[in-house]
Image (cartoon, helix red, strand yellow):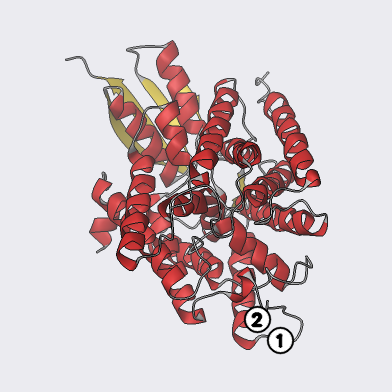
Amino acid sequence: MIEVDARGFSCPVPVVKTKEAIDNNPKAPLTVLVESEVSKENVSRLARSRGYSVMVERVEDGFRLLLSPSFK
Amino acid sequence: MRRLFRSPSPRMLLIVSGLAFGVLASLLVRWGNPANMGFCAACFLRDITGALGLHRAEVVQYIRPEILGLVLGSFTAAFAFKEFRTRGGSAPLVRFFLGALMMIGALVFLGCPVRALLRLAGGDLNGITALGGLVSGAFLGILFLRRGFNLGRSAKMPALAGWLFPAFMVVLLLFAIFTPYFILSSGSGTGSLHAALWISLAIGLGVGFLAQRTRMCFVGGWRDLMLIRDMHLFSIIAAFFVGALVTNLILGQIDHWGFVGQPISHDEHLWNFFGMALLGLAATLLGGCPLRQLILSGQGDTDAAMTVFGMIAGAAVAHNFGLAASAKGVTTFGAWTVGIGLAVVLVIGFLMKERRAS
């Protein structure tokens, strides 16, 4: 699984990194590690707008977001 | 109440916050703030810089309680929602310089992105030139972000560091209340025009609280629109503009529509455009407009606090070295500095890239 580690980066770098990973790996599930609440919201919003379902898991110092493409 | 602020898709909250901020910004003019300057992160930080004696432009010296309120409102919201986290170490010196250049760009145009909208909502069409520059700068910043630009990761720090900046604001508040002899206050000019201390402070606190919850950003809105075609943050900007415009119309605060003879404004289009382009580019690389930097400083982000100190230094330099524009127009040094500033930020944009982990 492709993992994007965006911990410690401030807005909008986590979104840019996630977008790049989505563009490079269309239709593949991704894991994104972020630290702040803001990054969690921003990355989730981007993923949902691109048709991914988002699962948030709380981890030590931050969140792990599981983005899975949903096929309709 | 808590649930409203926590709902996952708070579009309604964004729009209501934007509207409320716009209305309050126009009301502040009614209550004493300078025309088309109900709220301005850059101008108000510049006034604080003057009040502390760091520059000698006598007409722009006043401890603006709105700024103190913004930071302390954000601090309160961050604590209430358990989002206060002390962090730092993401290229603080680069942020300091970017903050300074952002301020110089703002003082050549005479306003931050918030005031650009307020000027337009008050009939000053130079706001359009400024927004054009701002969006162009943000677009350039996005190109750098896509190339992999970033200022590096921040790290967790002991909580004390995050408390320092809000504590500094409390000290400034005490200065504003007790006005010791070393705090300067304009007797005439822009700095002498202000609403009552408690009104300014209360509105600052409220806006700071909402801005922390909504992640309001007057550059981020444009950026997200172009970068990921997302309306989320932009909806705040749009609502803010509508709120300010409607309030100005109701209160009859629009003197005339046009480019010439507008309050605290000049019509040198080239420099209005490039001043704000400098700000838009620097803010995009920094991850937030001047207002957003103040909000982040209140929630423990010491890198944002460094940026704010950079802005204070930028304001001091702008007025001490005669770079700041005035209603008479742009100064030669101001124009040169915008050009040099753009070159410096472009170099930063090209060179600050993450090294690949080996």
Q: Residues within 10 Å of mark 1 (few under 14, many from 20)?
A: few
Q: On what subunit does the disc labeled 2 rest?
A: B
Image quadrant in which you'd find residue B203: bottom left
Query: What chain letter is assigned to the residue under label 1?
Result: B
Q: Which residue is mark 1?
A: B180
Q: Residue at x 40, y 18 (%)?
A: A22
- Is A54 above or below relative to B120? above
As drawn, is B304 to the left or to the right of B59? left
Task: Give the crowd class for mark 2: few <14, some 14-19, many >=20 residues within 10 Å.
Answer: some
Left or right: B161, with B259 as reference point:
right
Mark 2 and mark 1 in contact? Answer it, CB < 8 Å. Answer: yes
Mark 2 or mark 1: name the one nearer the start of the chain.
2
The residues bearing labels 2 and 1 have C-alpha atoms spaced at a distance of 6 Å
Residue B18, image x, y percentages = 35, 54
Q: Position of residue B353 (x, y in %)?
A: 67, 25
Residue for point 54% across, 46% down:
B289
Q: Residue at x 49, y 75 (%)?
A: B32
Q: Amino acid at mark 1?
A: Pro
In the image, B6 versus B63, the foreground residue is B63
Which is more toward the observer, B342 or B306? B342
Expressed as whole percent of the image width and height from the top left, the position of residue B119 reads 48, 53
Confirm whether residue B197 shows in the render.
yes
